[in-house]
């Protein structure tokens, strides 16, 4: 097919030449590559580097003061160290020339015993930009030592529970152990903080310490607080209560002689009735030795004297008076009810003469 095309082309040329009257053979043109123009040679080391970024941080404390001397380390995504440094007097530190990517920032030392280090954090680096961070180191908590003791002997007491806090917030609760002490960590928000201390449970056998104490603590320091308790007063036994009744046996009015003779075993005194010639009626006198009226005098006991015996004397006298009046009244009634004796018959004079 190519031959036919060539032949057709030749015929066309011959016909064209016949028309013009001339025939010219031109050699076939060959394609040649142009000569390269001279240019500057390049080397691999002069290849343009990709854009990098950086990280700049500022170190402060909770009060806003700049902190110098804090040490930091920055790691790449595979955990390789990409830079390290320490904050200057203005609390600043910069990690330059970091390839774009995610890095891990780690604080290795706070540079001050009053501060704690912060937790690790991720940082994103972008080309041609600087990532700026502010790092705030917290205050180290204060160490609290609690002691509970006896306010008299100073003996340490277990089982004492206290709350420690500020304002309306309780920050720490401690309970003394078998040795009478307890320890804990108290978080701080300033270089020196004042806290209240309240006992909410007293040791066994002791009263609760009700006043509120204060405690001042600083970062990283140890503060000691002591709560002194008073022993609970023992309540007296109800059976040991004093009594107002006399313990000694009082003397009785019956011991006093009624008619000049001894009161014990005294005989009744005759009382005459109101009518002449009537038979004599005796009034009984209460026996002072009976069990119902006289107490049992123990051998060797002394008679109870003083104001306490007055009620007994008055009561006995009233009793004797009432008994005598009753006896007289009864005797008079019996006399009135008894029939008069009939007169005896006079002797017959006639019979006597005989």
Image: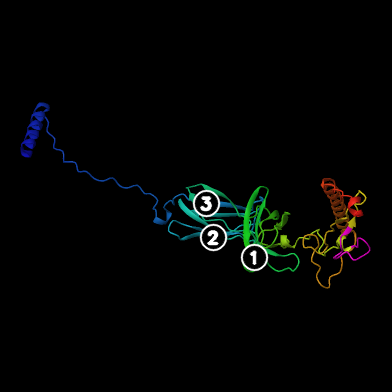
Q: Which residues are magenta?
A: 256-269
Could you say which quadrant of the image residue 137 lies in? bottom right
Task: Give the class, few, some or many, for how many residues have Cα within 10 Å of label 1's Cα (few <14, many ≥20).
Answer: many
Give the CA distance from mark 3 to mark 2: 13 Å
Residue at 35% in and 47% down: 37
Mark 1 to mark 3 CA distance (whole Å)? 58 Å
- Give the percent coordinates (x, y) of residue 183: 63, 63
Q: Which residue is mark 3?
A: 54
> Regarding mark 3 in the picture, which secondary structure is present there?
strand
Tell me the chief SS of the magenta region: loop
Q: Earlier in the sequence, mark 1 or mark 2?
A: 2
Identify residue for label 2. Answer: 84
Residue 186 visible within the image: no
Marker disc for residue 158: 1
- Above or below 223: residue 99: above
Are the residues at dot 1 and dot 3 in contact (C-beta closer than 8 Å)? Answer: no
């Amino acid at each position: 097919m190519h031959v036919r095309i060539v032949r057709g082309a030749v015929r066309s040329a011959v016909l064209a030449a016949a028309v013009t009257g001339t025939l010219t053979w031109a050699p076939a043109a060959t394609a040649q590559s142009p000569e390269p123009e001279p240019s500057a040679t390049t080397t691999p080391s002069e290849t343009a580097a990709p854009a990098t970024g950086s990280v700049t941080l500022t170190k402060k404390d909770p009060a806003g003061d700049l902190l110098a001397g804090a040490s930091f380390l920055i790691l790449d995504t595979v955990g390789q160290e990409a830079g390290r440094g320490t904050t200057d007097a203005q609390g600043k530190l910069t990690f330059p020339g970091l390839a774009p990517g995610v890095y891990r920032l780690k604080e290795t030392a706070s540079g001050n015993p009053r501060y704690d280090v912060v937790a690790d954090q991720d940082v994103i680096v972008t080309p041609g930009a600087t990532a700026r961070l502010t790092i705030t180191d917290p205050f180290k908590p204060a160490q609290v030592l609690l002691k509970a003791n006896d306010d008299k002997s100073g003996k340490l007491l277990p089982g004492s529970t206290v709350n420690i806090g500020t304002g309306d917030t309780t920050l720490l609760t401690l309970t003394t152990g078998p040795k009478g002490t307890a320890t804990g960590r108290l978080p701080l928000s300033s270089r020196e903080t004042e806290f209240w201390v309240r006992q909410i449970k007293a040791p066994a056998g002791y009263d609760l310490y009700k006043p509120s104490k204060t405690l001042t603590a600083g970062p990283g320091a140890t503060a000691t607080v002591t709560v002194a308790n008073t022993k609970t007063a023992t309540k007296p036994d109800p059976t040991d209560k004093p009594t107002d009744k006399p313990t000694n046996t009082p003397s009785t009015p019956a011991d006093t002689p009624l008619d000049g003779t001894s009161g014990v075993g005294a005989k009744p005194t005759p009382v005459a009735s109101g009518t002449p010639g009537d038979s004599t009626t005796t009034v009984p006198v209460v026996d002072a030795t009976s069990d119902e009226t006289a107490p049992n005098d123990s051998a060797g006991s002394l008679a109870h004297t003083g104001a306490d015996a007055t009620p007994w004397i008055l009561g006995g006298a009233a009793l004797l008076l009432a008994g005598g009046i009753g006896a007289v009244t009864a005797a008079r009634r019996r006399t009135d009810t008894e029939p008069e004796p009939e007169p005896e018959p006079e002797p017959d004079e006639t019979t006597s003469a005989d």
